[in-house]
Amino acid sequence: MGTWGIEPWDNDEAADWFQALFQVTKLGERVEECLQRPLTGNMAEIRAAAYVVLALGRAYIWPLESLDRCLPMAIARLQEIETLISDSESEEYRDILQAIVAEIQELLNRHGNEGGE
């Protein structure tokens, strides 16, 4: 087993497994399609798609050419949702807004590092 680090995706076998998973399920394409939807009527789905990028958007998991598109797109879409919720000034969205801000920050940190890491 070629191991490069301590994370579950940091070895040859896991990288191969994730590659096969993305090929068979077309997960990257489905996420990218969702992130391109209009915000109106799709906010929950777009946030869910952005979360998939947050959870799995790493080198050795996500195909890099797709990750290079999806990562900045997820950030931008979450920022749009943040703006929309912030503008509503509704107390019921306060906790959701805080969670979205944290998600954006984590994605920005990941985007700032080479190779999606």
Image (cartoon, rainbow, N blue to C red):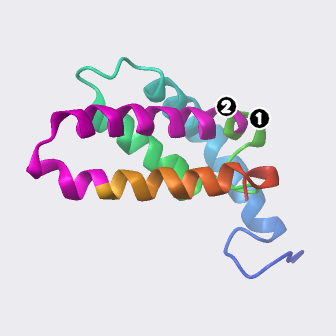
- Could you say which is closer to the camera, residue 103 or residue 54? 103
Tell me which residue sits at (68%, 55%) in the image.
61
Q: Which mark is residue 84?
A: none
Total numbered badges shown on the rendered structure: 2
Q: Is residue 101 magenta?
A: no
Tell me which residue sits at (43%, 59%) in the image.
102
Which residue in the structure is indicated by mark 1?
65
Crowd around label 1: few <14 · some 14–19 · many ≥20 (10 Å): few
For discs 2 and 1, the disc positioned in front in the rendered view: 2
Tell me if residue 47 comes above or below residue 5 in the rendering.
above
**Could you tell whether 57 is left or right of 11 in the image?**
left
**Could you tell whether 75 is left or right of 20 in the image?**
left
Q: Pinpoint residue 4: horizontal percent, then vertical percent.
A: 86, 75
Tell me which residue sits at (19%, 54%) in the image.
94
- Amino acid under disc 2: Arg
Q: Is residue 95 magenta?
A: yes
Q: Pinpoint residue 17: horizontal percent, then vertical percent.
A: 70, 58
Which residue in the structure is indicated by mark 2?
69
Tell me if residue 92 comes above or below residue 79 in the rendering.
below
Identify the secondary structure beneath mark 1: helix
Q: Pinpoint residue 1: horizontal percent, then vertical percent.
A: 87, 77
Tell me if residue 38 comes above or below residue 58 in the rendering.
above
Identify the secondary structure beneath mark 2: helix
Span highlighted in magenta in the image: 68-97
- Could you say which is closer to the camera, residue 91 or residue 5? 91
Look at the numbered discs 2 and 1 and tell me whether their residues touch, using CB distance below 8 Å.
yes
Q: Pinpoint residue 21: horizontal percent, then vertical percent.
A: 62, 49
